[in-house]
Amino acid sequence: LMPITLIITVYKDYEALERVLDSVCKQSMIPKQIILAHDAIDRTIHQTISQFSSLLNITHIDQEDTGFNKNRILNKAILLSQADKLIFIDGDCITHKHFIKNYCHDNFCVFKD
């Protein structure tokens, strides 16, 4: 199987993010890399990240909150990815335990050039 990067967009809902990352920890196939694409600069997120950093390979990127700029932070996340397959979810999407495995086996992943 090819390495997978899971890109999670986040906007200040760290309680939801904690649940999402917990669901990622319970995956039957753990992504090689998780990029938190944070559409704000807020140090509070680091408390949530630290809870999962020993279990998941998390890269965090952020940008100044100047309005809805989700696509800009997603583009930055794509450039930082170290994998051949990219999966995108929002920071309030709790995943089924076979989400990553099923998603990639069904060939719905986006491939980087």
Image (cartoon, helix red, strand yellow):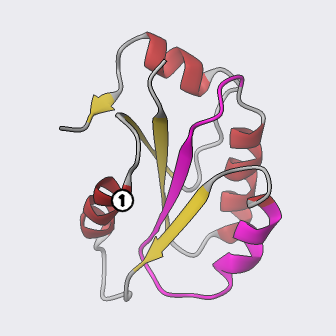
Image quarter (top left, top right, bottom left or bottom right) of the C terminus: top left
Q: How many marks?
A: 1
Q: Residue at x 63, y 53 (%)?
A: 57
Q: Residue at x 54, y 47 (%)?
A: 33
In the rendered image, the residue lying farthest to the top is: 106
Q: Is residue 16 left or right of residue 4?
A: right
In the rendered image, residue 84 lying in the magenta stretch gets the answer no
In the rendered image, residue 49 lying in the magenta stretch gets the answer yes
Q: Residue at x 77, y 47 (%)?
A: 22
* Residue 59 locus on image (x, y percent): 54, 63
Q: Nearer the viewer, residue 24 or 95?
A: 24
Image height check: is 44 above or below 72?
below
Q: Is residue 100 left or right of residue 88?
A: right
| Residue type at the position of mark 1 | Leu
In the rendered image, the residue lying farthest to the left is: 113
* Residue 85 locus on image (x, y percent): 37, 32
* Residue 64 locus on image (x, y percent): 37, 89
Q: Nearer the viewer, residue 27 or 58?
A: 58
Image height check: is 105 above or below 29?
above
Q: Secondary structure at mark 1?
A: helix
Magenta part of the chain: 28-51
Neighbor class of circle 1 (other Cα within 10 Å; few <14, some 14-19, many 20+) is few
Tag 1 residue: 80
Determine the image quadrant of residue 88: top left
Q: Residue at x 38, y 87 (%)?
A: 65
Image height check: is 20 above or below 11?
above
* Residue 105 locus on image (x, y percent): 46, 11
Image height check: is 112 above or below 39?
above
